[in-house]
Amino acid sequence: MSRHTKKHHTQTVLALDCHFMPMVEMSRRKALKAMATGRAHALDLRTWSKLGLQDVASQPFHAVVFSKAKAVAESKLGFGRGNASIFRRDDHRCQYLGCTRRATTVDHVIPRCQGGPSIWGNLVACCRECNARKGGN
């Protein structure tokens, strides 16, 4: 297949500010351009290590950090497709200690019945078993 007929990746990438707060979802192409111009770097969400342009040129990546970007209020963030951003941030893995299962639900760390907000910092991906075990306690 020639380079002109290949389909472009339509993967979206989460853009994070200097405090690792989410700002927006962007196309892979825009993220690569920001990396090439030195405005951002890719982040390996498994190890929280910085990835270079060579590391991500031919493989998927999920987040880029704009080191000079200012933090925004969480209430002003638009996550687009709801829980998809949470699953992508947490690599589709249950975030509760000792669990290695695939995440299928999103849980409030501080339950809503106890006043926990539905914001990025209070939501985690988790498996159905851990979510049910925790309940609202």
Image: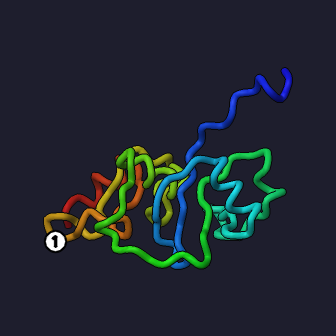
In the rendered structure, the answer to whether residue 36 lies left or right of residue 134 reads: right
Say which residue appears at 83% left-offset and 29% top-offset: 3
Q: Secondary structure at mark 1?
A: loop
Q: Residue at x 68, y 34 (%)?
A: 8
Residue at image position (61%, 68%) is 65
- Exactly how many numbered labels are in the figure? 1
Q: Nearest the camera: 126 or 83?
A: 83
Tell me the residue that label 1 is attached to: 115
Q: Position of residue 67 (x, y in %)?
A: 61, 76
Could you say which quadrant of the image residue 38 lies in?
A: bottom right
Task: Identify the image quadrant of residue 11.
Answer: top right
Question: Which quarter of the picture shows residue 46?
Answer: bottom right
Question: Residue 54 location, x and y as percent?
Answer: 84, 57
The type of colouring in the image is rainbow
Q: Quadrant of the N terminus?
A: top right
Look at the image and tell me in which quarter the C terminus lies: bottom left
Q: Is residue 89 above or below residue 121?
A: above
Residue 2's place in the image compared with 52, above or below, is above
Q: Amino acid at mark 1?
A: Gly
Q: Residue at x 59, y 78 (%)?
A: 68
Q: Is residue 49 left or right of residue 78?
A: right
> Residue 45, how many percent across, how many down?
61, 62
**Dot 1: few (<14), some (14–19), or many (≥20) neighbours within 10 Å?**
few
Query: In this rendering, would 77 be left or right of 1?
Result: left
- Of residues 68 and 84, which is closer to you in this image? 68
Specify the farthest residue to the left. Answer: 113
What x and y, as percent, mark residue 73?
Answer: 34, 74
